[in-house]
Image (cartoon, helix red, strand yellow):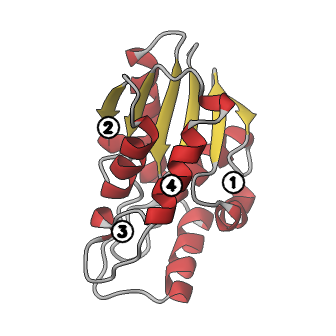
Amino acid sequence: MSNSIYFLRHAETKFDPSTPVTEWSITSDGLEKTKELASKEAFEVIHGIVHSNEKKACQTVDAFAEGLDIQKYALSGLDELKREHEGSLSDEEYRTRVRDTLVNMSENAPGWESGAAALKRFESAVNKINMMFHRKNILVVSHGIVLTAYFCKLKNFQSIAFERWSQLKWLNWGLVRGGRVLIDIV
């Protein structure tokens, strides 16, 4: 695990209850902010980008990598916690389900993958990334719930996972090397 992995939450999303959440797009403002972020000194040397299969993550990667000659890889293990339910949820209902998922990781809300299963899948993907690269700077673009669960486990903050998720913003990023958090995502 000698890679420096920069974990990035995807850009701002256009909410569209008429389409599956995996097909939601990023906003034009999110697109512009992603391009601004890519020009920051912290991201000067990125050797590869690995991302979720979800559309909003792919669009974030495309905006970030625009004009760069960089390898991009999709890895389904980086997808957000699987969330399927009938009809749309209100903001309050959604937050309640996220809270329940992050507080009771082994349980799953109706139609949702458990937090424990999502975290295990995510950690397996991170292990694959560490096997794919050696001593490289890698950007991983993923999603709020799984990123929160991962960083909380690394920092032993599981008891405040929902509070940390509530503070997570679009395009927040953190840095992990050798399983240690060097820059927190929140």
Q: Earlier in the sequence, mark 1 or mark 2?
A: 2
Query: Which is in the foreground here, disc 2 or disc 3?
Result: 2
Q: Residue at x 37, y 57 (%)?
A: 56
Report the disc number at residue 83.
3
Name the residue tied to disc 2: 75
Q: Position of residue 138 (x, y in %)?
A: 50, 25
Which numbered dot is residue 158? Answer: 1
Question: Which amino acid type is marked by label 2?
Answer: Leu
Residue type, numbered disc 3 = Arg
| Closer-to-camera residue (126/20) | 20
Give the foreground label among 4 and 2. Answer: 4
The percent coordinates of residue 154 (x first, y second) are: 67, 38
Q: Which quadrant of the structure image shows residue 86?
A: bottom left
Q: Amino acid at mark 4?
A: Glu
Q: Which mark is in front, 3 or 1?
A: 3
Q: Residues within 10 Å of mark 4 (few under 14, many from 20)?
A: some
Calculate the distance from the C-alpha at mark 1 to the C-alpha at mark 2: 25 Å
Q: CA distance from mark 1 to mark 4?
A: 33 Å
Q: Is residue 130 above or below residue 88?
A: above
Does the CB distance between marks 1 and 2 fall below 8 Å?
Answer: no
Assign a secondary structure to mark 1.
helix
